[in-house]
Amino acid sequence: MKHWLVKSEPDVYGWLDLVRDGATRWDGVRNHMAAGHLKAMRAGDPVFVYHSNAGKAVVGVARVTREAYPDPTDATGKFVAVDLEPVAPLPAPVALATIKVDPRLAEMVLVKNSRLSVQPVTPAEWAIIEAMASG
DNA sequence: GCCAACGTTGGC
DNA sequence: GCCAACGTTGGC
């Protein structure tokens, strides 16, 4: 089982929207590296939901419910989408600023390649962030 | 609002 | 196939 992180702008589609909807199609990804990560997702994989721009924090955990399939919003047929459902909000959001100052998280993709919208998260990184969220 | 980083596009 | 120009993302 692999761990992941997806980014979204809370003003556009945030954690609360996912909770309200109960499930969503994660589409619109138009970056090949990010698309590669979407294709590597397996049903049941846990996914951190990160709020970019307004927010800048990891706010919740979701789960992959449907593996990669052609993104209906992509006319070229090159890109894929997955389906996600919310699992639980983090007990407390973990801010990007908090992540950046922790030397154990210096290698996180979120820190090193902040523009990548779908990222792998190592088991160690996942555990550290969950611990931070629990205080 | 600015701008650095990055990916993509298009001329050659 | 290279690379300059451009657009977009996202932190600050």
Image: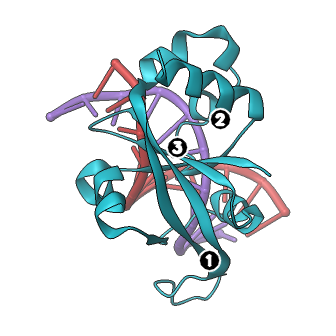
Chain colours: A cyan, B purple, C red
**Between tags 2 and 3, which lies in front?**
2
Task: Answer with mark 2 or mark 3, whichever residue precedes in sequence.
Answer: 2
The residue marked by circle 2 belongs to what chain?
A
Circle 1 crowding by C-alpha within 10 Å: few under 14, some 14–19, many from 20:
many
Position in image of residue B9 (x %, y %): 53, 72
Circle 3 crowding by C-alpha within 10 Å: few under 14, some 14–19, many from 20:
few
- Disc 1 residue type? Phe
> Considering the numbered disc 1 on the image, is that residue within a helix, a strand or a loop?
loop
Q: Residue at x 29, y 53 (%)?
A: A16
> Considering the numbered disc 2 on the image, is that residue within a helix, a strand or a loop?
helix
Circle 2 crowding by C-alpha within 10 Å: few under 14, some 14–19, many from 20:
some
- Disc 2 residue type? Val
Q: Residue at x 27, y 58 (%)?
A: A12
Residue A53 placement: quadrant: top left
Residue at label 1? A79
Position in image of residue A60 (x %, y %): 45, 43
- Disc 3 residue type? Arg
Out of A105 and A84, give the one closest to the viewer.
A84
Residue A127's mark?
none
The residue marked by circle 3 belongs to what chain?
A
Q: CA distance from mark 3 to mark 1?
A: 18 Å
> Considering the numbered disc 3 on the image, is that residue within a helix, a strand or a loop?
loop
Residue A127 against residue C1 in the figure, above or below: above
| Relative to A69, A23 lies left or right | left
Q: Residue at x 77, y 63 (%)?
A: A40
Position in image of residue A31 (x %, y %): 59, 62
Residue at label 2? A109
Mark 2 touches mark 3? (CB < 8 Å): no
Out of C2 and A106, give the one closest to the viewer.
A106
Task: Answer with mark 3 or mark 1, whichever residue precedes in sequence.
Answer: 1
Task: Answer with mark 2 or mark 1, whichever residue precedes in sequence.
Answer: 1
Residue at label 3? A115
